[in-house]
Structure formats: C-alpha cells, structure tokens
Image (spheres, rainbow, N blue to C red):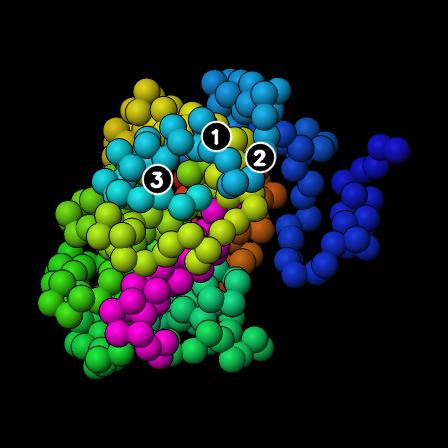
Amino acid sequence: MIMDMQQYIEEAEKALLHTYNRYQVVLDRGDGVYLYDIEGKKYLDFCAGIAVFALGYNNKRYNDALKAQIDKLIHTSNYYYNVPAIEAAGKLKKASGMDRVFFTNSGAEAVEGAIKAARKYAYLKDGTTDHEIIAMEHSFHGRTMGALSVTGNPKYREAFEPGIGNIRFAEMNDFDSVMRQVTYKTCAILFETVQGEGGIYPAQEEFLKRVRALCDERDILLILDEIQCGMGRSGFMYAWQKYGVKPDIMTTAKALGCGVPVGAFLMTEHVGSHSLVSGDHGTTYGGNPLAGAAVGVVLDLFEENHILENVNQVGAYLEEKLDELARKYEFIVERRGVGLLQGLVFDRPVGEVIAKALDGGLILINAGANIIRFVPPLVISRENVDEMVEILESCL
C-alpha cells in the first residue's frame, strides 16, 4: 500500500523506538548534493547524513562497486580472510599513515576498541587494571557505554551512570587543565581533533604538540577521534596531518564508507605489538567483504576526484560567505571551523532557523542549541554554497 508522507510518519511513530525527534520529512532518493522526499520535493543537503555522504548521492562508480560485491559475497566472518578488506586496509594505512587497522561497524565501536587497546597496553606494562583515561569537556564520542563514558557532556551520561570508570575530564586547548588531571595511572589522553557536537572547536596546534610531548615523556597513549573531522573534511585526509602530530591510536568512521556502516580504529606498529592479541577483541560484521568494498572504492574516489583539493577551495569560499553573514547580522556571534566542517554561532537557539531552512529546501543541522553546523558532501561547488546562503539568509 502506498501512503502519503504523514501516513508514513504516523506508521514510524507506532513502530520505532522514540529516541529521535525527527523532522517531518520522509526522504526517498538522492542525486549529487540534493535529496528528494517521497513527494518529489528537492533539498540542498548541507548535512550529508551527519558528515557521512562525502561523495554525494548516486555516484555511479561507488554504486557499481557495491552492486558487484553484493553479487559476489557480502559476509563471511573474521574466521577467514577476504580480499576487499585486505585491500581496504592497505589503502587506509596509506591514507592515514598508521600501521594497523581494525574494522568496526560504527564510530562508537571504534572508540570502544581504542579504549580497550589503551587499557591493554597499560595492563601489559604493570599488570594492574586501575588505569585512567583523560577526555575533554564538551566532547562527543558515541552512545555505547565506553564511548559515552568519555563523552564530556553530563546530560548524555547522567541517566546511564556509572560508566566504565576511571575517566577524568580536562578542557580542550587548555594544557594546564590536562596536567591537573594527569596521574601515575593515566594510560591515555583522548579527544577529537576538531570537536563536532561540542561546538565545532578545532584543537590548537600548540595544544596538540604539548599533549603529544607529554604522552611521549610519560608513555601515555594519544588517541585522536577523527570520526567526524576525518576523511578529508578538514582539507587533510585526517585533521591531525595538518600539524604533523601523529596519534598512537586513531578512530575513523562516517565518510569512511560513505553510507555503508563501517568504522575503524588504527594504531602504530608499537601499540599494535603491545596491546590487543587474539581473543581480546572481535566483531561479527566488522570488515566484511561489503564494508571492505565500500572503503576501498571510497578511498580510490577521494584520490581520483581530487576531493582534498575541492575541500580546500570550496571550504575557503564557504568560510568567506559565512564570515559575511556573521558581520551582517548582530545575532550571529562568530564563525568557526575548518574546511567543510563549519559552524555559525548565534546568541539564541537556532532550531527555528533550521526548520525554516528545511521548508525552503535546505537541510542543515545544529551542534548544540545555538550553533548551525555545515557538513555538506565534500563534492559541493561554490554555486552550491551561494544557493545555500541565499536560502539561509531568507530564513534569517
């Protein structure tokens, strides 16, 4: 039975657990940087599935690669090798500069694995299990219990306490606050290279370098979460590469599969040789042939289509246009961000503006109550930026 938009929404509310306050739109298909609802209305997408669909919608090469793999083999389990995952791991190592890869199903699972690897690394050094991890206030790392425990926003955690324990919080870009949390039990320092949900705050170069030096001095592992800011969104394949501050462990997901659920945590050879071993960690679906095929073709297309060059060129133009808006309207406090991960900070809640933009055919999301977040597909053009600004300004 074919239903109209409202009927589909009513059916969803009867069947789905109500953990999302969804916009009243049923999306049906996508093409390029546009989405269409089931009634045929067109939307310019500046959300990209929350920084996921980097290559835009209906990319023929991507679609064909997945269709071909579906016809061959979708899943086998990690009791066996498979070619797509092996090839994807090699390409991901090259793109990231890391040495060992563990494929997961999501970003939250990648954070879980990173936490386990850090604690196992520390356990092998002294045989104790009371090691501590320092995370950052206002951070967001996921909704599973370990990832939630290192998420620096109490409203996400309070109903689910106690978390995994032995977590301390410091202030992003405040090295002294990090030092106040360091003890002889500290095994890792974890933060997003660019905070996303927490308000689009990039890590400052000096902060990154001082934390890296501290970790080197005390044999503490530096874990950088690149789930949202990685995969080219900063103008570098991974945001830490801009500063040359290499982590010991890194997490990645979202645009890694451009829609196929896949994430990964990666580590240096040293950490890989002194942490998780057979039996310590596992996953049924992680790194299956379909996910491997997605990662492989995504990384190929990033290189072939010069995605980083486009991010740097169009990202600079987006910054320019958002800065113009910030100067024009007194209720816009500032613009901040890097590349195609940008935020406009308002002096009031932005929910009404985002809703009006949706009515006008523009998809935006927030980062906190008073920030509009811009995370479009990485293939957008200057013309798409102009179209976005025109719709947004009509809402302002």
CA separation, marks 3 and 1? Answer: 23 Å
**Residue type indicated by callout 2:** Thr
313 versus 226 height, above or below: above
Residue 110, magenta (yes or no): yes
Q: Which residue is mark 1?
A: 82
> Marks 2 and 1: in contact by CB < 8 Å?
yes
- Residue 309 appearing in the image: yes
* Part of the protein shown in magenta: 104-130
Front-most of residues 180 and 315: 180
Sequence-first tag of 1 and 2 = 2
Q: Measuring from the top left, give residue 290's x and y in whole percent.
A: 54, 31
Q: Measuring from the top left, give residue 362's x and y in whole percent.
A: 53, 40
CA separation, marks 1 and 2? Answer: 8 Å
What number is the disc on residue 231? Answer: 3
**Residue type indicated by callout 1:** Asn
Looking at the rendered image, the disc whose residue lies closer to the viewer, 3 or 2, is 2
Please state, as top left, top right, bottom left or bottom right, where the N terminus lies in the image: top right
* Crowdedness near tag 3: few (<14), some (14–19) or many (≥20) residues, C-alpha within 10 Å: many
- Residue 334 appearing in the image: no
CA separation, marks 3 and 2? Answer: 27 Å
The quarter holding residue 340 reads top left
Residue 121, magenta (yes or no): yes
Q: Considering the numbered disc 3 on the image, is that residue within a helix, a strand or a loop?
A: loop
Q: Which residue is mark 2?
A: 76
Q: Measuring from the top left, give residue 380's x and y in whole percent.
A: 39, 30
**Residue type indicated by callout 3:** Met
* Crowdedness near tag 1: few (<14), some (14–19) or many (≥20) residues, C-alpha within 10 Å: some
Q: Considering the numbered disc 2 on the image, is that residue within a helix, a strand or a loop?
A: loop
Front-most of residues 350 and 197: 197
Left or right, 176 with respect to 194, comes to left
Is the magenta region chiefly helix, strand or loop? helix
Left or right, 199 with respect to 359, comes to left
